[in-house]
Image: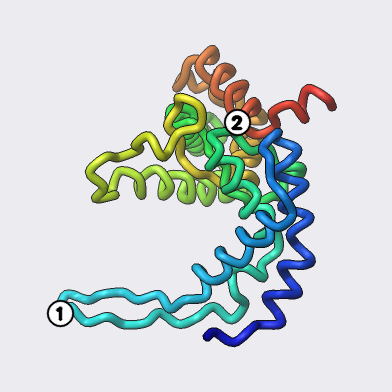
Amino acid sequence: MSTPRTDVDEWVLASAAEVTRNVARHGVPITWSEAAERLRRTVELLSGPVFVIDDGGTFTPLPQQEIPRWQETGFAESVACAAVHYAGQPYYPENPQTSRVELAIPWDTATALVHLLSALLVARLTGPTPSCNQEQVEAAQLLNRLSADVAFEFSRDDDALLGDEEKVGERVYLLMQSCDVWQALDLLGNGREALRLAGVTDMEILDLTLWEARCWLFGPYEQAS
């Protein structure tokens, strides 16, 4: 029999209402007890040891994080997001600019964002007055993160890449952090003129991609604002 953990119990009690609220506002039915059970199962899953295997077949445990993932700010929202995605629906964070929850962004939209960010970086660095300011550094860092998300999917060994279990509605998706998608929209919106002058992308494609990403990031909340 496992030993009860007071820290987990207290966290579940403090977080179950947040999960219930975030799931329910998307029209997905969930009770407080179901939310609490999801939180407990998630903690159990993340609390187990993680091993890596070397070329010789030896399993080596990875060091535990100093602060467990489930204690990180915003983790309860991630549990709520997973419940909404599991129901086949998009999740809209209340604070998309700062939320680190992983959203299910349609695959075509996600790859278009990566392509456009790459084009923007090239336009900025090869324009008439190239510069390497903080915005370009942030754009490069963001491009690196989002490109890694895309590359990870292509490197998977699954027999059915992006199968039926990875769909919202009828569209396959890629998980991207809300704050990363928001930053991509901000950078591309501010860089629209640079892209136009460089002639490296179709403006209609840019506008369509920005509109599509905003729909999946803000959902009905943007309409209400």
Please state the horizontal and vertical placement of residue 206, each as a whole percent of the image.
Answer: 54, 20
**Quadrant assignment, res 23:** top right
Identify the residue under disc 2. 188
Mark 2: give few (<14), some (14-19) or many (20+) Cα within 10 Å. Answer: many
Q: Dot 1, crowdedness within 10 Å: few (<14), some or many (≥20)?
A: few
Name the one closer to the observer, 131 or 21. Answer: 21
Precedes in sequence: disc 1 or disc 2: 1
Q: Is residue 215 left or right of residue 151?
A: right
Q: Nearer the viewer, mark 1 or mark 2?
A: 1
Q: Secondary structure at mark 1?
A: loop
- Residue sitting at 45 percent across and 82 percent down? 63
Give the amino acid at mark 1: Gly
> Quick one: which residue is furthest to the left in this view?
56
Residue in the image at 77% along x and 47% along y? 21
Residue name at image x 63 percent, y 38 percent: 91
Residue 129 is left or right of residue 126, and the answer is right
Please name whichever residue, 138 or 59, is drawn nearer the observer in this view of the structure.
59
Element type at mark 2:
helix
For residue 175, the mark is none
Residue situated in front as seen by the camera: 14 or 138: 14
User: Which of the 4 quarters of the picture holds residue 3?
Assistant: bottom right
Residue identifier under label 1: 56
Res 9 seen here: yes
Q: Residue 122: tell me if it is visible.
A: no
